[in-house]
Image: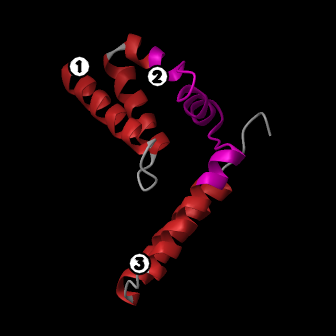
Amino acid sequence: MRILWLAAGLFFTALGIIGAFLPVMPTTVFLLVATACFARSSPRLHGWLVNHPTFGPPIRNWNENGAISRGAKRLAIGTMTAVFALSLIIGLTWRVLVPQVVLMAIGAAFILTRPDGPSA
């Protein structure tokens, strides 16, 4: 079972790193899942991810406080807005736009109702 958790952790870490470069893929969510997988399989990789200079702070903020930083909130909402604007520009139909707005609104509501964390 440990090997499956390790493989899942590596898979979600890869998705998280890809998400750092692609604006439509969430980075932190994948890294949170990877952290949970590594906690069950590899203390070394878990420690590496939690203490990583770039990826570690948002993971620790979530794990310790259930919080999302203001900057991350701004980035997430800004990205959602940009994706929706692009959807309008390219002329997607209302059958695509309506579910997109509903899902983005749910995601935005979740993000905006989380605390900012101890540094706020």
Could you tell me the amino acid type at mark 1?
Arg
Whether 51 is drawn above or below 92: the answer is: above
Label 2 sits on a secondary structure element that is helix
| Residue marked by disc 3 | 99
Residue in the picture at 52% in, 21% down: 52
| Residue marked by disc 2 | 49
| Residue marked by disc 1 | 2
Of labels 3 and 2, earlier in sequence is 2
Question: Between 15 and 88, which is closer to the camera in this rendering?
Answer: 88
Query: Residue 15, which numbered label?
Result: none
Range of residues picked out in magenta: 47-75
Q: Classify 10 Å Cα crowding around label 3: few (below 14), some (14-19), many (20 and above).
A: few
Could you tell me the amino acid type at mark 3?
Pro
Asked if one can make out residue 72 in the rendered structure from this viewpoint, the answer is: yes
Tell me: 51 left or right of 61: left
Of labels 3 and 1, earlier in sequence is 1
Picture coordinates of residue 27 (x, y %)? Answer: 46, 42
Residue in the picture at 62% in, 40% down: 66
Q: Quadrant of the C terminus?
A: top right
Residue 27 lies in the magenta stretch: no
Q: Classify 10 Å Cα crowding around label 2: few (below 14), some (14-19), many (20 and above).
A: many
Whether 4 is drawn above or below 76: the answer is: above
Tell me: 110 left or right of 10: right
Q: Classify 10 Å Cα crowding around label 1: few (below 14), some (14-19), many (20 and above).
A: few
Picture coordinates of residue 45 (x, y %)? Answer: 39, 16
Could you tell me the amino acid type at mark 2?
Leu
* Mark nearer the viewer, 2 or 1: 2
Question: Between 73 and 24, which is closer to the camera in this rendering?
Answer: 24
Q: CA distance from mark 2 to mark 1?
A: 18 Å
Question: Between 23 and 5, which is closer to the camera in this rendering?
Answer: 23
